[in-house]
């Protein structure tokens, strides 16, 4: 893919508010069909970055290109290609969901009701109740349907699952993956460690207004640590297991060998296959520990992951 046509490309973008820091020196590239999660604690700069991407606020310096086009000079055209879910959603309270979504559809010379219906049914959204009578989760669903209904090439979702119960979160994750499978690009923000590994292809970690790491989830999984508990029918010298460079023995109950294994499990499984195994448990890899280590201490991710997982 030509880098110039990337759905999102930000270079050295800085935005300072009068009262202080927004984001600093943000470099970011998101490829076509990718689900990119922007992970960081509250106040890290996620919403600021997203508002810059929509040209709702202008950065002090740096360059922003969407689909290879300079954002500022193509703002109106580009906006048509984007579905956006704002972080703080405000909706017309007196309308029903049906009226509101129809209104949005007209604004954009947008989809007919059958498209909207498909989405509202996928979300299990009751469309004939007034917005003001809807729960936070259902309001969020209205926002998501609004973002997704215009057949956008790029979805920008600011904390799409906040306030949703776990079942609905899973539905939203599924719709995001389905959108990516159709070739759409998704940029979402989250402060929830556990969800980004489930939904994203790549994760950018932002802290205090700066991006501290950008990682592929599949790569992280490959480097991450599994915890293996194994009990043998007869005696096996644990030395034979621990001799592998990637395995570390951890304290465990009498009769059980507990190992932390980084990377592929294949070599360990090959050793195990040669012995009578009574019981085997494998946990992980624990991506949350990896993400957490980036949010606390930049270069300690592997050591942290091992320490956190032993308890
Ligand atoms: N309109 C604003 N005026 C002044 N400061 C702001 C404004 N919006 C955000 N900030 C500050 O910029 C930083 C990043 O905020 P934000 O982008 O909203 O973070 P996030 O979305 O990751 O929670 C925070 O320190 C926040 O207080
Ligand atoms: Mg925010």
Image (spheres, grey):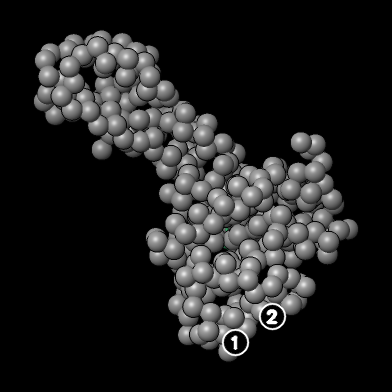
Q: Secondary structure at mark 2?
A: helix
Circle 1: is it few (<14), some (14-19), or many (20+) Cα within 10 Å? some
At a point 50% along the width and 54% down the height, the residue shown is 174
Asked whether, in this view, residue 281 is left or right of residue 74, the answer is: left
At a point 61% along the width and 60% down the height, the residue shown is 157
Look at mark 1 in the image and give the residue it sits on: 95
Q: Secondary structure at mark 1?
A: loop
Labelled pair 2, 1 in contact (Cβ < 8 Å):
yes
Q: Is mark 1 within 8 Å of ligand 2?
A: no
x then y, percent, for residue 237:
18, 11
Circle 2: is it few (<14), some (14-19), or many (20+) Cα within 10 Å? some
Look at mark 2 in the image and give the residue it sits on: 103
Whether residue 38 is visible: no
Asked whether, in this view, residue 37 is left or right of residue 7, the answer is: left
Which residue is situated farthest in the front direction here?
A: 114
Q: CA distance from mark 2 to mark 1?
A: 10 Å
Asked whether, in this view, residue 301 is left or right of residue 175, the answer is: left
At a point 28% along the width and 24% down the height, the residue shown is 259
> Where does the C terminus fall, quadrant-wise?
top left
Q: Which mark is residue 12?
A: none
x then y, percent, for residue 238:
21, 14
At a point 60% along the width and 39% down the height, the residue shown is 214
Which residue is situated farthest in the bottom direction here?
A: 94
Whether residue 66 is visible: yes
Q: In this rendering, is residue 61 above or below 258?
A: below
Q: In this rendering, is residue 110 above or below 188?
A: below
x then y, percent, for residue 108:
76, 72
Which residue is situated farthest in the right direction here?
A: 73
> Where does the N terminus fall, quadrant-wise?
top right
x then y, percent, for residue 226:
35, 30
């Amino acid at each position: 893919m030509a880098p110039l046509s990337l759905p999102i490309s930000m270079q050295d973008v800085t935005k300072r508010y009068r009262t202080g820091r927004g984001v600093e020196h943000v470099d970011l590239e998101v490829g076509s069909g990718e689900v990119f999660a922007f992970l960081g604690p509250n106040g890290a700069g996620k919403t600021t970055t997203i508002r810059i991407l929509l040209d709702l606020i202008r950065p002090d310096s740096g360059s922003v290109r969407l689909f290879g086009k300079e954002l500022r000079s193509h703002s109106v055209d580009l906006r048509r290609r984007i579905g956006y879910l704002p972080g703080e959603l405000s909706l017309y309270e007196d309308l029903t969901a049906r009226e509101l979504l129809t209104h949005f559809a007209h604004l954009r010379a947008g989809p007919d009701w059958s498209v909207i219906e498909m989405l509202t049914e996928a979300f299990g959204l009751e469309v004939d109740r007034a917005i003001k009578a809807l729960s936070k989760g259902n309001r969020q669903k209205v926002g998501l349907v609004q973002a997704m209904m215009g057949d956008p090439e790029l979805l920008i979702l600011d904390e799409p699952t906040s306030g949703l119960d776990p079942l609905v979160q899973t539905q939203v994750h599924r719709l995001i993956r389905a959108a990516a499978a159709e070739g759409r690009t998704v940029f979402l923000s989250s402060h929830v460690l556990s969800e980004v590994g489930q939904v994203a292809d790549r994760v950018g970690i932002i802290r205090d207004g700066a991006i501290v790491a950008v990682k592929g989830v599949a790569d992280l999984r490959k480097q991450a640590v599994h915890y293996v508990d194994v009990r043998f029918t007869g005696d096996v010298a644990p030395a034979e297991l621990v001799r592998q460079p990637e395995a570390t023995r951890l304290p465990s109950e009498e009769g059980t060998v507990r190992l932390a294994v980084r990377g592929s499990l294949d070599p360990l499984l090959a050793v195990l296959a040669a012995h009578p195994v009574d019981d085997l448990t494998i946990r992980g890899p624990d991506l949350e520990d990896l993400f957490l280590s980036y949010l606390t201490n930049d270069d300690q991710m592997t050591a942290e992951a091992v320490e956190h997982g032993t308890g």
